[in-house]
Image (cartoon, rainbow, N blue to C red):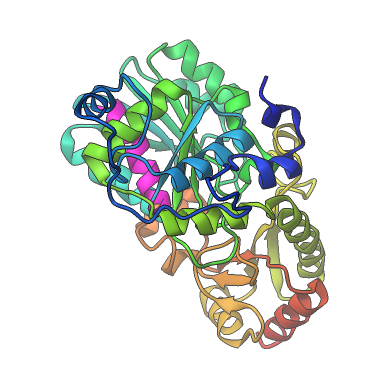
Amino acid sequence: MTENKKRSFATQTIHAGAMKDTYGSLGLPVYQTSTFIFDSAEQGGRRFALEEEGFIYSRLGNPTNDALEKKLAALEGAEAAVSTSSGMGAITSSIWPFIKAGDHILACGTLYGCTFAFLNEIQKFNIEVEFIDMTDLEEVKSHLKENTRIVYLETPANPTLDIIDIEEVVKLAKKNSKDTMVIADNTFATPYLQNPLKLGVDIVVHSATKYLNGHGDVIAGFSCGSKELMTQVRLVGQKDFTGSVLSAHDAFLIFRGMKTLEVRMKQHIENAKKVVEALQKHKNVEKVYYPGLEDFKNHEVAKKQMKDYGAMVTFEVKGGIEAGRTIMNNVKLCSLAVSLGDAETLIEHPATMTHSTYTEEALKEAGIAPGLIRLSVGLEDSDDIIEDLNQALDLI
């Protein structure tokens, strides 16, 4: 057992992946280079043949990125991780190496809009993709096929916050076939709240743009899992398919941001719970969706597999889409913007923004109502967030 694994989550966010350089720098050095010098032709040959560890070219690995990947792997309990230049880079790099024409992918119906679009696009390559309600385990069981290569899920799901029982889905997938992989998007929960690898998932993906970085100034992603799978993700998915390589400078920013992940998540969640309580009391709010509510579908599953319930909140208002637009156009503190996990509270309309890739029928099937509003609760004073939402809600 390594030292990192013995230490608490908070300690690992700060110390995991830290490296000692020649000059004793406390901060992570940024290795701003495209290529690396070999000691000899023989060494270069050994590295290309994967007979010797070491750096070759920054598209294949960089010391700054390596430190960041080690930090994320430690937090997720993974053997290895791969950093990418976006969350979609992580998702696509984690799927391409493991599928071929004739394969079947089973995915949850409520997904990030671009993931949904990608899984629709790849069907042109004779890859069958089915979208189902994975909160219903009987649905999962009945849709698994002999050629199901990947089961793909998000939990909590974007934007409805659907909670999927990870452990039970993994059991069904592995019973179906030893060749069936399970990939889970852990962006909303972060490793602070949920560790899908410990529940049997093969690969965990993240949009590091969100909570992991936490400051709204980087686009990035991660894939993590066993060393064997991550070698495929890096050398096939990333190198040969997507080219989705994170810059060393962006890796440095995320490494720095992750040092405060636990501190930030605690405050995000504390604020979110107060916002949920306030929204439930407002006369113009039809329904509030939050996994921490006892009447939330699969609340007990969330309680079982998550440390807490996160800081994403969605709600429906009386008056539908027009009322929703009134709120979004009149908030003064909350920022009308997509993305999430920033210090600022962000508000958006999924049906016409993040999930505009869904057809009307698909939106309905995914439970994304026209009047649904998604809120990423930030780090401002909770009273100020609530006051801003209330004054906008009063205008309906």
* Among the 4 quarters of the image, the one containing residue 232: top left
19 vs 209: above or below: above
Q: Is residue 347 left or right of residue 39?
A: right
Residue visible at 54% across and 45% down? 21
* Among the 4 quarters of the image, the one containing residue 75: top right
Residue 274 in picture, x, y percent from top left: 82, 64
92 part of magenta stretch: yes
Q: Nearer the viewer, residue 361 or 324?
A: 324
Q: Is residue 359 left or right of residue 162?
A: left
Residue 56 in picture, x, y percent from top left: 29, 38
171 vs 367: above or below: above
Q: Is residue 374 left or right of residue 36?
A: right
Residue visible at 74% across and 27% down? 6
Residue 74 in picture, x, y percent from top left: 61, 34
Q: How many marks?
A: 0
Q: Where does the N terminus fall, quadrant-wise? A: top right
- Say if residue 212 shows up in the picture: no
Is most of the magenta stretch helix, strand or loop?
helix
Residue visible at 34% across and 34% down? 234
- Say if residue 380 shows up in the picture: yes
Numbered range of the magenta stretch: 85-99
374 part of magenta stretch: no
Q: Nearer the viewer, residue 228 or 371?
A: 228
Q: Where does the C terminus fall, quadrant-wise? A: bottom right
Residue 202 in picture, x, y percent from top left: 48, 25
